[in-house]
Image: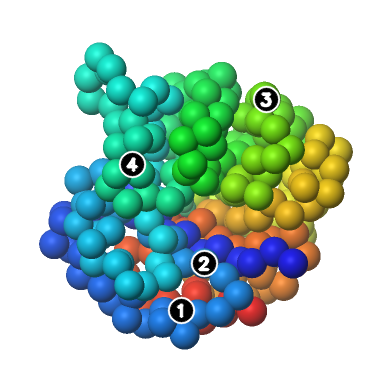
Amino acid sequence: MRNWIVAGNWKMHNTIAESVSLAQAIKEATTAVKNGEVVVAPPFTALHSVSETLKGSAVKLAAQNMYPEDKGAFTGEVSPLMLKDAGCAFVIVGHSERRKYFNESDNQINLKVRKALTTGLKPIVCVGETDGERNSGVTQAVVNRQVRKALDGVGVGQMDRLVVAYEPVWAIGTGKVATPEQANDVHDFIRRLLVEIYGCAGADVRILYGGSVTKDNIAELITIEDIDGALVGGASLKADAFLGIISKMP
Ligand code: 13P
């Protein structure tokens, strides 16, 4: 049995005050949530304040990125120890915006995944094809490469803390959500890959769908066997929209 996760990736939005007020609204409205986890990923500047706000609730905190070293001369970067210190349980790794705008490679993403796991953070590893890749019929090849490289050197004993997010790049922020069939194909593919590499431990990994998720399209997606929740961008910035998605979880 896999518990669902609904995670809100706030990206580069929200001041500290805005973050705290959004977190407070989510905290108050999710006290009765069962069988799943609600996660919010505010910007770095708001992590600690949001962590204080979420105390006494089951809502978990995630960072949107990290640098794969404990500390050192890495100006502008934030370490996994600092994220834990700020109250994070999860960290998003390899988001397509990081791959695209900051040239994050599969190798760097692999270092981050491994470091997050050894530090005790749960990585939410993002994979997904671009529009061009889908149109050229290489979706599975791309996702295969991204998953295998991200998990290179990751052991079977770490599977219980791994989360994978399938986020087709063409669906992010476009309002063009993957059809249930498209999502099912790739989630099923990722599941088979995880089981091929990790045996039954791979069957327990949560695989989230991300890309233009709203309260109106999640109900159908969440009925799909290998969709274990959602990674939400735009619709996570307003409490009502985010809570509407959570209300559709089984
Ligand atoms: P949207 O929900 O805004 O499409 O963003 C998805 C995303 O990138 C979550 O990480």
Q: Regarding mark 4 in the picture, which secondary structure is present there?
A: helix
Q: Position of residue 200 (x, y in %)?
A: 83, 49
Residue 32, percent across and down? Answer: 47, 85
N-terminal of the two: label 1 or label 4? 4
Rate crowding at label 2 as few (under 14), some (14 to 19) or many (20 or more) other CA atoms within 10 Å: some
The answer to whether mark 2 and mark 3 are in CB contact below 8 A is no
Label of residue 219 in the image? none
Q: Is mark 2 within 8 Å of ligand 1?
A: no
Quadrant, the C terminus: bottom right
User: Do callouts 1 and 3 mark residues in contact (Cβ within 8 Å)?
Assistant: no
**Does residue 206 sit above or below 159 in this rendering?**
below
Mark count? 4
Placement of 147 over or under 17, stated as above or below: above
Gap in Å between the C-alphas at discs 1 and 2? Answer: 15 Å
- Residue type, label 3: Asp
Q: SS at mark 3?
A: loop
Residue underneath mark 3: 152
**Label 1: which residue?**
244
- The residue under label 4 is which amino acid type? Leu
Badge 2 element: strand
Report the Cα–Cα distance between label 1 and label 4.
28 Å
Outermost residue to the bottom: 32
Corner quadrant of residue 126: top right
* Cα–Cα gap, marks 2 and 4: 19 Å
Residue 70 position within the rendered picture, expressed as x and y whole percent measured from the top left: 36, 25
Q: Which residue is mark 4?
A: 83
